[in-house]
Amino acid sequence: MAGRMTRANTWSDADVESIYDLNHDDPGGKTRRLLNVMKAIRHCNKAPDLKSALRLVVKSTCEVLECEHATLFMVDENSDELVVESASNGSPDIRLPLDSPSIAAAVYHSGDQVNIHDAQEDPLFNNKVDETTGILTKSVLCVPIMDGNFEPIAVIQAINKHSGQFTCEDELLVGHLSLQVGVILRNQLLLEESKRSHSQVLSLLDIVKSLHSDLGINSLMFTITERCPSLVNAERCTLYKIDRKHKELWSLQGAVEIRVPMDTGLIGYTATTGEILNIEDAHSDSRFNYEVDKSSGYKTKSVLVMPIKNKPHDGSAPVVVGVLQLINKQHGPRFLQEDESMLGSFLDIVGSLLVTSQLFQYAEHSMTEFGAAQDLNVQAPRTPKTPPLFYHPDSITEGEEGEEEGEEEY
């Protein structure tokens, strides 16, 4: 690797004194540059949120190091990737696997600063960033950003020094900046996680409250499928109920009933085994029916299939009464263990509601929701005019429209 490689933030007092010659009055504007570092740290510390802090880190790096561009790679531990959350030129997000042959990944693993004079000649240089941003990378100064526990939280990569090549002074300045920025970013991440968890809890409580409003089967299923994606940041969601007599799973899309064979596809596997499926790439699983994507034009990537169980009052083992399928985790390659735990607790409540709902009991005896409501002399919930956009079974076999649902055996 061309250029200088130095252990991050290990400058001795002698190193500092040799760079900052105190016998001269601010030679080369060194004192001014050091003051810029202090200002950058102060501004980043005042950032109101994580995104603002990331933008300030990138901007400050360019100003302090006097370079053309800078890229900040945040560490995504869930996907083992480096993610470009913000770039000085406004380029789109870029993801690099931690095991990829790239300068940023090498810096992450080694914890070393890397000063490269000619990036195009370096064997670790990954031109994916250049292809995406349209920037020709020449000189590179790449530095790990550690939090207060000296755990790598990000990597900052400065590109194309205005004067040609990055210097020892640049390494020292960005080392000071990265130490303080690491603590700031970790605090912002913790704050974001706290806000997200609080929002999820409030949303979950709100959904549970709405489910205890004597909803009919149509409204109950619509409410669950409409609200669940926000709990785990999924794109789409579908709830299937088990019809054991006909060995089918059925779902409602507006006023249209959809039926799927109980032993087919990912949802069929969960319905028959009671197991959770958390798949990063649905197309790599032989149980997935890719014809659905082919015909609809929708691209299914990650899938989370959760069983909905009801615990009988006689103390016997829980029985699977339905399946919840969520598709495409947003802001990540797959659904997390935390997503499974949150949905698992929620679906424990849903299972009993599906079985004990008064209108659901009438629906089991071949009655529509509206017929049941009329028989009970109550106001039937209105069916939403616009069908939800969450319907996306991994395998479809539609029954005849209007087919009556038989009584189920639990």
Image (cartoon, rainbow, N blue to C red):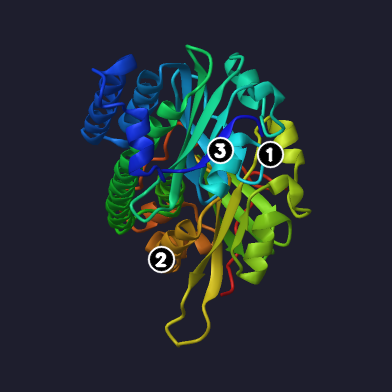
In percent of the image, x 61 and y 68: which residue is there? 275
Q: Label 3, on which residue?
A: 5
Picture layout, residue 162 above or below residue 362: above
Question: Number of labelled discs?
Answer: 3
Q: Nearer the viewer, residue 17 or 401?
A: 17
Position of residue 256 measured from the top left corner of the image (x, y, whole percent): 57, 41
Query: Is residue 164 something that shows in the picture?
Result: yes
Query: In this view of the protein, can residue 387 be seen by the observer?
Result: no
Q: Is residue 153 above or below residue 406?
A: above
Q: Residues within 10 Å of mark 3 (few under 14, many from 20)?
A: some
Nearer to the camera, 131 or 167: 167
Foreground label between 1 and 3: 3
Q: Tell me where residue 63 sits by quadrant.
A: top left
- Looking at the rendered structure, the kind of residue marked 3 is Met
The residue positioned 75% from the left and 42% from the top of the image is 290
The residue at which mark 2 appears reads as 345
Picture quarter with the N terminus? top right
Which circle's residue, 1 or 3, is located before the other in the chain?
3
Cα–Cα gap, marks 2 and 1 = 41 Å
For label 2, the crowd category at 10 Å Cα-Cα, with few meaning under 14, some 14 to 19 and many 20 or more, is few
Marks 1 and 3 sit apart, C-alpha to C-alpha, by: 17 Å
Q: Where is residue 118 shown, x and y percent of the image?
A: 64, 22
Mark 1 highlights which residue?
Answer: 101
Mark 1 is surrounded, within 10 Å at the Cα level, by few (under 14), some (14 to 19) or many (20 or more) other residues, namely: some
Q: Position of residue 145 (x, y in %)?
A: 42, 42
Q: Tag 2: residue type?
A: Ser
Q: Are marks 2 and 3 in contact (CB under 8 Å)?
A: no
- Who's the residue at 70% across and 36% down the image? 293
Alpha carbons under labels 2 and 3: distance apart: 50 Å
2 in relation to 316, above or below: above
Q: Kindly give the residue lying farthest to the front in the view shown.
A: 23
